[in-house]
Image (tube, grey):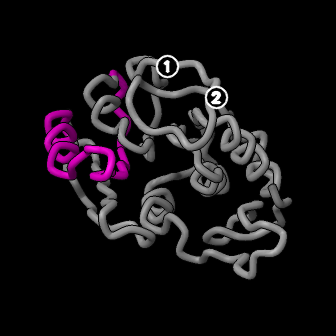
Amino acid sequence: MLPRKQSTCNGVKTRRAYLFDRTTKWPDYEEELLATLRTHVTPDDSVVIVGGGWGVSAVTAAERGATVTVYEPSNEQVERVKETADLNDVVESVTVQHAKVGETGEVWGKSSASVVSPSDLPECDLLELDCEGAELEILRAITVTPDVIAVECHPSHGVSEDDVRAVMTDLGYEITNRAHESQSDSVVILTGELHSGS
């Protein structure tokens, strides 16, 4: 495997690019999820991210003063999240759990992660689910009530936007934003805000 070099994803330093890649900047990477974080995360918030990917969401939340807990099941990606936090000087604000939340969902690459029940997720102000098909299982089983939930809906993994929307509504969330992921028209991001009084 080729070594990786420093690159940026939506302004966040990563090592996503391989040594000989011409592209080293992805300015629109995860733009819709990051816009939710930029809009809703304030200093001293607690953010839980299920599906850490490259760590870009974690860094974005930490740079806004949040304490971030990331659950990532992929052996390789858990190291990438830690590396990205280090590259962006937010290691003190980001805790990475090598764990898969729930039993469903696709994992990128190999995984030796433990499994965490969705009901064991900690209280938080914002919950981000980018978990490749585990969205519904997690939403149906969570016991926490964050002010905001952002969910990537993955129809290619059998998760429909309508089903996610229905579960979020049943949990007391009003869908305040709907956007397509810039890298895939089939992936929809729903942002829900907890109704006051819920």
Inspect the image, locate mark 1, and give the three-letter code of the amino acid beneath it.
Val
Tag 2's secondary structure? strand
Is residue 91 rendered to the left or right of residue 100?
right
| Quadrant in which the C terminus is drawn | top left
Amino acid under disc 2: Gln
The quadrant in which the N terminus is found is bottom right
Query: Is residue 74 at all visible to an observer of this figure?
Result: yes
- Answer with the quarter of the image where residue 111 lies: top right
**Label 1 belongs to which residue?**
116
* Marker disc for residue 174: none
Q: Position of residue 71 (x, y in %)?
A: 56, 33
Between 14 and 76, the one lying in front of the other is 76
User: Which residue is identified by label 2?
Assistant: 97
Left or right, 107 with respect to 20, comes to left
Instruction: Give yes or no for contact between labels 2 and 1 (Cβ–Cβ under 8 Å).
Output: yes
**Residue stretch rendered in magenta on the structure:** 143-172
Q: As displayed, is residue 115 above or below residue 136? A: above
Please report the residue visible at 67 percent of the width from the left and 71 percent of the height from the top.
Answer: 11
Give x and y (percent) for residue 75. Answer: 68, 35
